[in-house]
Structures are given as C-alpha cells and as structure tokens.
Amino acid sequence: MDNVLSVEKLTKTYATGFAALKGVDLSIRRGEIFALLGPNGAGKTTLIGIVCGLVRASGGKVTVDGFDIAQDYRSARKKIGLVPQELATNMFETVWNTTVFSRGLFGKKANPAYVEKVLRDLSLWDKKDDNIRALSGGMKRRVLIAKALAHEPEILFLDEPTAGVDVELRRDMWEMVRKLRESGVTIILTTHYIEEAEDMADRIGVIDKGEIILVEEKHALMRRLGQTRVCVSLTRKLDAIPDGLFDLPLTLSPDGKSLSFTQAGEEAERGKDAGLARLLKNLLARGVDFASVQSSQSSLEDIFIDLVGKSR
Amino acid sequence: MNYSAVRAIYLFELARTWRTLFQSIASPVLSTALYFIVFGGAIGPRMQPIDGVPFAAFIVPGLILLAVLTESVSNASFGIYLPRFTGTIYEILSAPVSAFEVLLGFVGAAATKSVLLGLIIFATARLFVSFELVHPFWSFGFLVLISVTFALFGFILGLWADGFEKLQIIPLMVISPLTFLGGTFYSIDMLPPLWRNVALFNPIVYLVDSFRWAFYGIAAVGPAISLALTLTMLVTCIVVVVVIFKTGYRLRT
Ligand SMILES: Nc1ncnc2c1ncn2[C@@H]1O[C@H](COP(=O)(O)OP(=O)(O)OP(=O)(O)O)[C@@H](O)[C@H]1O
Ligand SMILES: [Mg+2]
C-alpha cells in the first residue's frame, strides 16, 4: 500500500510532564480520507501539530511522502496544508491578501487564477476585499481553509473543521473535501461529530489518552463492531421467550410486550437475516400476533462510545 | 532559500506599517518636531555651540537615534509578538521556512521602517535647522547598522515577552532613558568626571557619539570603538536568535 504519511513510535511529553502521545504508530494511505477520532484531550491536535511542525516530538519518527519532518522539513512541509482547530486570523488583513500571503510563505509562485478558484470554491469570492475581522466565525473558518489550500497541498489536515459551523456550510465543506479527494489530495480530519466521519471517511482511527486504539477501514469496522437490532412489538403480552427460539439472540422486554433481536454486524451479513425470518415464522406459527417490526443499525457513534468507554 | 517566503513576510510587515502609518511614522516625527521647536528653536539660541556645532544642530543625530532605536525595538517586537498572541504564528511554523528566513522577513521589515523613519526625521530636522553632513556615507551606514541591530533586539524581545506590558516596558523604560542620558542633548565631556565614567557604561553613548561623528566630525569617544560595539551587539543578538530557534523557545511547545 502506498503510504503518504507514516508515523512511528511517536511520543510527546509536554514541559508540564504530561505525556500526550505514548508511542503512536500510524500510516496514512495516499488519497484517502482518514478520520482521527478521540475524546477531548486524547492527543489529536498534538499529533497533527507534530506532523505540521508546530510541536516538537519527544521521540519517534515522522515521514511525509518519504521526507523526514525534521531533516527534510522543507520538502515535508511543502506538501502539507493545515486548518488549525483554533480560529487564528490576521484580523486586519483582507481575505485576498491573507490567502496570497499563505501561498508566498510556502514558496509558491503567485497564481491569481488559482487563488481565485480556491476563494470561489469556498464561496469567499465576494468577500475577497473584506477585512477578516468583519467576517463571521464560519467565514473565518473558510478563510483558514483557503489559506491551507493556497499552496496546493497534497495532504490536508482539518482539525475539527466543522466546530461552530452551520449545517449548510458543513455540507458545502464536505462537498469540497470530496472534490479535493477526487483531485488526489489526502485528507486527515478530526471531528467530534462522529456521523460526519461515518459519512466521509475511508478509514477511521481512534486515539485515546495518547494511544491509537484502533485503525480500520470504515466499512469493515461497521461490519465487525456494528450491530443490527430488530424490535418486534407484540399485541399481547408474553411470559417467556417461546421455546424453540432459545438459540437466537433474543430478549424479552420487562413488560413482556416486545421482543428484541440483536445481531453483530458480521453475523447479520453472513446469516442474511435468516434468524429473523425464523423468529417471525415461529411467532406466526404460534399465533403470536405482532403490531410492528422495527430494525435499527448501530452507528459509528455507538461503536465509538463503546470503544472509548471500554478503555476508561 | 525560500525567497518567496521572505518576500511575503517582509511585504506583510511593511503593509502593517502602512495600516498603522500614524503610529509608526507620524507620531515619532511629530514628537521629534516638538523637540526641535523646544530645544532647537526656543532654548537653542541661548546655548553655547558644543565643539563648534550650534546646539540646535548638535541634537539632531541624537534625536534621530532616539526615534530610530525605540521604533526599531517596538516595531520588530510587535511584529513577532502579535502573531504569537493571536495564534497566526502557526502558519509560519508550519511553512517550509528556515529560522533565518523568518528573521530576514521580520527584522528586514522593521529595519527598513526605521531607516525610512530616520530619513524622514532627518528631512524634518532640515526644516528647522541648517547643517551639513561631514560623512554622509557613514551617517547612512550607521543608521542602517543601528536599525538592524535594534530590530534584532526587538525581535528577541517579542519572542521573550508574554504580555503587552513587557513589550512596551523595554523601549519606554530602558531604551528611551538610556538615549536621553546617552548624550543626545549634551556631550559627555560636559559631565563631571565621575558621571562621565558612569556614562561610559551606557552603550547608547557610543551610538550617539559615532552617529554625531558621522554628521559633524566631532566625537567624545571616537567612531572606531562605537563601530566595534555596535557590531558586537549585532552578533550577540544574532547568536541569541539562533539559540532561540534551535531550542524552539516560546515558539514550539
Ligand atoms: N502546551 C501544552 N502543555 C501542556 N499540556 C498540553 C499542551 N497542549 C496540550 N496539552 C495536553 O495534552 C493533551 C492532548 O491535547 P490535544 O490538544 O492534543 O487533545 P485533542 O485530542 O486535540 O483534544 P480536543 O478534542 O479537545 O481538541 C491534553 O490533555 C492537553 O491538556
Ligand atoms: Mg484538538
């Protein structure tokens, strides 16, 4: 597999003595969208900070497309665009100037047509001559994205890009992320909105207390750890689970009026709901009438809470 | 060498001056003009010429330096402190630039402003008093050298400071008093022997002295020692900056 970023045994202990990263290993594939999830203080921003040159690693090695971030920092950093978690903007600059500045800083030749395209894609074109301080928070976030894209990075870090951003802008933003991915940009994002990661990501990494506890293909993860739950509401109360069905993963609600059937994602795939069919046939055969059948699938959020909860 | 980055930082910093034109240029020019009116115009005619130079002309080099020193320090310190304070420094830290390039951009811009300011004050002074330069080349040379040195010093200050008070306190409480006492309005030869010796511990005495030598060819201590001292300060500042960047002090956690 072609890795565009590789992190090996990365550690970070802050001056306070706090160990924010405890030996992180991570490989990011070229062209993927990778979602790094983790609770507050897990070390996501620290990890991104080290890769981008804002934080000094205490130990370990990071290479960006083969370039070591310490020895070959120029080649490494040229490839990276960063949208930081904190909104930090040059308030008295115009949108246009600040974006052109970013491009210059990364050693790229001026290219007004490209900068225009970036601003247009982010719906910032009509604001290009506005002072940044006159923009709303969501607009400022877009300016940070424009700055990060100004030097045509191959890898884009988005550290909680959707925090404090309204629904519409969020949709636009993800639309843009998809387009960037199509153009070959690798995207590494963090978010506390797990459903966004579920929508967007190719792979998911979970970090907790400075350790990566999981890295997996999203679909595989959902299949492996996700659950399908079917709830059958009965018209009449049952006293016990009907015999002949004991082998199925069934639970009867305390009031005896609903049966729920839970299957791990993988089993559900494999069994193709054979168990459910058996349950329903059995109930019909016994004359147990039911009012409704509802099925629900666990979200990445449930999986995430389960994972992080376990390690507490 | 990432020239494009140096250029970007340099122009960005100059643009900041343009936005704060009044603060950066107009206000030092105004206060210097006031000095000329009070000391040059009102008091000057009643004073004896010093070493053959009329008092109003005598104070010109010192007044130029007073503005140049304080503005170099505050411009450069503010230039680097502001992005640290607002967090926009992240972009510079994540960019493919070396410490030297960052320094060149920030210090170059601050020094450019100071040199321009010095020239503007020089021109303003000519409106009030007439004088001829004995060593125009050296005058300009010293102006550039001193601007760069103090901009570097300001850059260090801006890295070290963790609040706005600290930024203001050094120019206000250290640079200004030392410049006033550094022979702007008198020759240190006019001091009683004890105080003359004390004054020799004030580095700015040498700067004013050599700058005045470049203007009028008169000197209390002589330009060679001043030049050596300025260069020593310059090198010291460069070394400190290199150490700061090597250790990531106050920049990278
Ligand atoms: N400069 C610092 N000095 C000391 N400790 C720090 C510093 N920066 C971060 N930390 C600590 O390191 C840990 C990881 O912080 P980090 O910002 O990487 O978390 P995060 O995963 O990005 O969290 P969030 O979701 O809240 O953004 C936290 O416990 C934080 O308090
Ligand atoms: Mg964070």
Image: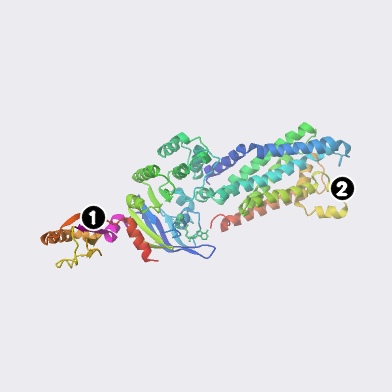
Residue B116: in sight, yes or no? no
Q: Position of residue B143 (x, y in %)?
A: 71, 42
Q: Residue at x 53, y 41 (%)?
A: A133
Residue B194 percent across, percent down from the top left: 86, 55
For mark 2, does the 10 Å Cα neighbourhood hold few (<14), some (14 to 19), or many (20 or more) residues? few
Looking at the image, residue A83 lies above or below residue A115: below
Q: Which residue is mark 2?
A: B190
Residue under pointer 1 = A295
Q: Nearer the viewer, residue A280 or A225?
A: A280
Depth check, front residue: A244 or B104 = A244
Residue B200 among those drawn in magenta: no
Q: Nearer the viewer, residue B36 or B215?
A: B36
Magenta residues span A216-234
Question: Mark 1 and mark 2, same subunit?
Answer: no
Left or right: where A286 falls relative to A177 = left
Q: Secondary structure at mark 2?
A: helix
Residue drawn at the location 79% of the way across and 33% of the way down: B128
Residue drawn at 66 percent across, 39 percent down = B23
